[in-house]
Amino acid sequence: MLPPAMIAVVILFCAFGPAAWIKNPWSIVVAGALTTATVQALEWVHERHAGWRMNGREFATDLFYVVLGYSVISWVSTRIAENPLAAAKHSLGITTQWAMHLPFVIQVALVVFLVEFGQYWMHRAMHNSVLWWTHAPHHHITQLNAAKGAVGNPVELVLISLSVMALFDLPQAAQFCAFNILGVVSTFAHANVRSDPPRWYAFFFTTIRHHSLHHTALSYDDTRCNYGNSLILLDRIFGTYRDGESSVVGQDDRQRLSVWEQTIFPARPLIARARARKQRDSASATG
């Protein structure tokens, strides 16, 4: 019951907590860090798979990507997507004031759906197009832990962070609440925690069982399921849901990538062509 209990705490805090805390832009960072730290600590007392046990190298890598997400990725996403969308909304006179009058819980649900709907289709596109080159590094992780959702190629991390939320008029408290709910669900869905939530929770929200199967080491085709980062309900609706669990994760013979290797991964085809051309030129010169 830990995942639903943490969601309940988030909703109650956002509905009745101090407005000054919720409006503070640092609150989302603090709340996210507390969520990750709490779930990470649970891995030590309720471990799911010994093969996913945290070590120094994994912790350092995860911490790097968490900081990158809250700083560089957030900054880029705001500059290339949120600010332009907000400006377009203002210039075109787009308004959704009706959303401001919805009950708080409905506003939160709306934000969750809007964010997850976009992420579902972006994630699905990444598995079925040339965008795979940006997403593949995330599937080279060889174990799942609380912060693993933040690990990946920077281009993918920017793409998966994009949303249309800037086009909607919704109170900050509802957005803050929704983002933290998504954080709780996603963190547990990547964590090495022996937690199997109730069936009603697993019908709507992604769990570690769902997401570990998405990261299975069997084959690339076997990863093309369970795209919902937090809402597995979307997979049920669009026919991409698959039941099961995998304790062995990682692509390409479970080859773990360093931070540098993840960063340059989309350029690998170009690098390979350049090396092949150089070898042909060298062979021609010596021949």
Image (cartoon, rainbow, N blue to C red):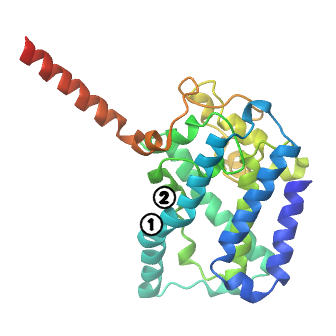
Q: Earlier in the sequence, mark 2 or mark 1?
A: 1
The reply to whether residue 76 is in sight is: yes
Q: Residue at x 42, y 39 (%)?
A: 265
SS class, disc 1: helix
Picture coordinates of residue 252 (x, y %)? 53, 26
Mark 1: which amino acid? Val
Task: Please state if 33 lies on the left or on the right of 70 as rendered.
Answer: right
- Give the quarter of the image for residue 7: bottom right
**Viewport quadrant of the C terminus:** top left
Closer-to-camera residue (234/187):
187
Q: Residue at x 14, y 16 (%)?
A: 283
Reading the image, the residue beneath label 1 is 76
Reading the image, the residue beneath label 2 is 158
In the rendered image, the vertical position of residue 40 relative to residue 287, given as above or below:
below
- Give the quarter of the image for residue 13: bottom right
- Give the quarter of the image for residue 81: bottom left
Picture coordinates of residue 267 (x, y %)? 35, 40
SS class, disc 2: helix
Closer-to-camera residue (209/137):
137
The reply to whether residue 110 is in sight is: no
Picture coordinates of residue 116 (x, y %)? 64, 59
Task: Please state if 41 lies on the left or on the right of 120 as rendered.
Answer: right
Closer-to-camera residue (238/278):
278
Picture coordinates of residue 243 (x, y %)? 77, 35
Q: Residue at x 61, y 53 (%)?
A: 63
Find the residue positioned furthest to the top: 287
Task: Please state if 81 lies on the left or on the right of 169 as rendered.
Answer: left
Give the alpha-carbon distance from disc 2 to disc 1, as whole Å. Answer: 7 Å
Mark 2: which amino acid? Val
